[in-house]
Image: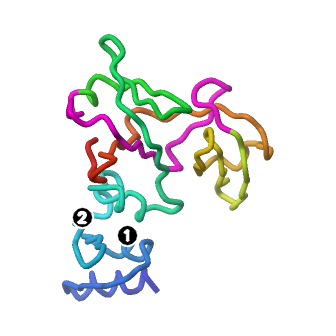
Amino acid sequence: MRAELRKLQKRLKVTTIHVTHDQVEAMTMADRVAVMKDGKVRQFGTPEEVYAKPADEFVAGFIGSPPMNFFDCTLVRKGRKLLLDAGDFRLDVPREMAKLLPAEVTELRLGIRPEHMRLTDGKGIRAKVDVVEPLGPELLVHLLIGKTPAIMSADPSVSLRIGQAVGLEFPADKIHIFDRKTGKAIV
């Protein structure tokens, strides 16, 4: 039905305003998406922009299925390096990203989408497999990173057991950083 409506809209060359609570419908049918909360527009842009560069935590958590994973963290200076300290893991802040972080904001929230988390050969961020959901073309892997739950999307050929310890990588170009107090995107 979505595809038929989209084709009809294109064929008739009409501007259409479509209101929906179904994010898949919004993302697949729209040239532009307005994400609203409490009657206010939180972000307006193309589906790709809203997904890749969410304006705030609400948009980041609302768009995407499963939703973005979030970790409270503190910005720590260690010599000339900046680190994101989430308690259960630390990540180096790449130089390009460090330039964008305001010096006065140290209480942050790190976000990463499930499909951007990578399994490693045991190195990196330590996690424990809590639940494995085979979905055909992907596995949804529910993890515990310390006490924080997270969901990752993995290739279905990967063999994982409940309780298994795994290593994870969060590619630097795929992480999002939000101001923990305001929820606004910083990077």
Q: Amino acid at mark 2?
A: Gln
Q: Judge left or right: residue 55 versus residue 91.
A: left
Residue 168 drawn at (x, y percent): 59, 34
**Disc marking residue 43:** 2
Looking at the image, residue 85 lies above or below residue 2: above
Q: Residues within 10 Å of mark 1 (few under 14, many from 20)?
A: some
Q: Judge left or right: residue 103 versus residue 76.
A: left
Which of marks 2 and 1 precedes in the sequence? 1
**Residue drawn where x is 34% and y is 25% of the image:** 94
Give how far apart the Cα atoms at labels 1 and 2 are: 13 Å
Looking at the image, residue 148 lies above or below residue 123: below
Q: Judge left or right: residue 119 versus residue 175.
A: right
Q: Nearer the viewer, mark 1 or mark 2?
A: 2
Q: Secondary structure at mark 1?
A: helix
State the residue position of label 1: 27
Quarter assignment of residue 46 = bottom left
**Magenta residue check for 109:** yes
In this view, which residue lies farthest toward the top? 79
Q: Are marks 1 and 2 in contact (CB under 8 Å)?
A: no
Boundaries of the magenta span: 99-127
Residue 122 drawn at (x, y percent): 67, 26
Q: Amino acid at mark 1?
A: Met
Q: Nearer the viewer, residue 10 or 181?
A: 181
Q: Judge left or right: residue 99 versus residue 165.
A: left
Residue 159 drawn at (x, y percent): 77, 42
Q: Residues within 10 Å of mark 2 (few under 14, many from 20)?
A: some
**Residue drawn where x is 58% and y is 49% of the image:** 150
